[in-house]
Image (cartoon, rainbow, N blue to C red):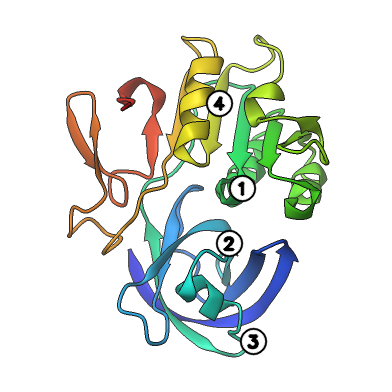
Amino acid sequence: MKQSVFVIKENRRIAEGIWKMVLAGDGTAVTAPGQFIDIKLDGRFLRRPISVHDADEGSITIIYKVLGHGTDDMTRYKPGKQLDVLAGLGNGFWDPGYGARPLLIGGGVGIPPLYLLAKQLRAAGMPVQVVLGFNSKADVFCVEEFEALGCDVRMASADGSAGVKGFVTDALPSPGTYDCFFTCGPLPMLKALDAAIPAGVPGQLSFEERMGCGFGACMGCTVPVKGGYKRICKDGPVLDREEIVWQA
């Protein structure tokens, strides 16, 4: 974890309720796809944890959804504004031993962290299949970015206006065309994917939990796993499929 001051380079709406923010600053604290940053907002007590979409030595890019007063405030932040940011929080995706034909599945704001993962997998020469889930065509974002990497992209939407009508589980490629999977999205989606993807296929799932501190001190995002408990902000947000305990 590293605390730094970043300067907003870009902050714009890219889909219905979805915004993209590019922050100039030291991005070296981000060491793995799937990590997140924690942003201090003006007039707000708690920082806002947001997953990293892309990062390099001189910048970090995030994609966020307007869900409350804090993220609504963020939409009015202009280029040039400085932000106090904790970067490089949490663990990340990708155990190289998992397989050579990865499948990436993202739903809504669970999509952004998969982009940096796809970049690394493609740089390693792997074929990458991607399934993205949205509510409707108005919510679609990032598809062209994945396609530009050379990924095979499929879409699903609840109303059928983009891709397959239904959920990401309705757009999954045939078993045998992938040998591992990585996913991020709402809990019902993660649980449905675990049931839909054949047993024995290794995977990593990134969980969304309400966080207080964002770095493991408050214990507010603790969840049960096989053999004990883990903090989603510190020990996660990425968990291995084999360790997850699904609760009713």
Q: Secondary structure at mark 4?
A: strand
Q: CA separation, marks 3 and 2?
A: 18 Å
Whole-percent x and y of residue 94? 49, 35
Q: Nearer the viewer, mark 3 or mark 2?
A: 2
Task: Give the residue displayed 55% in from the left and 75% down from the top.
Answer: 72
Q: CA separation, marks 1 and 2?
A: 9 Å
Q: Secondary structure at mark 3?
A: loop
Q: How many marks?
A: 4
The kind of residue tagged 1 is Gly
Which numbered disc, 3 or 2, marks the residue that appears first in the sequence? Answer: 2
Q: CA separation, marks 3 and 1?
A: 25 Å
Q: Secondary structure at mark 2?
A: strand
- As drawn, the label of residue 65 is 2
The kind of residue tagged 4 is Phe
Task: Give the residue displayed 35% in from the left and 20% down from the top.
Answer: 242
Q: Nearer the viewer, mark 1 or mark 4?
A: 1
Q: CA separation, marks 3 and 4?
A: 37 Å
| Residue marked by disc 3 | 79
In the figure, is residue 132 to the left or right of 188?
Answer: right
Which numbered disc, 3 or 4, marks the residue that appears first in the sequence? Answer: 3
- As drawn, the label of residue 108 is 1
Q: CA separation, marks 4 and 2?
A: 24 Å
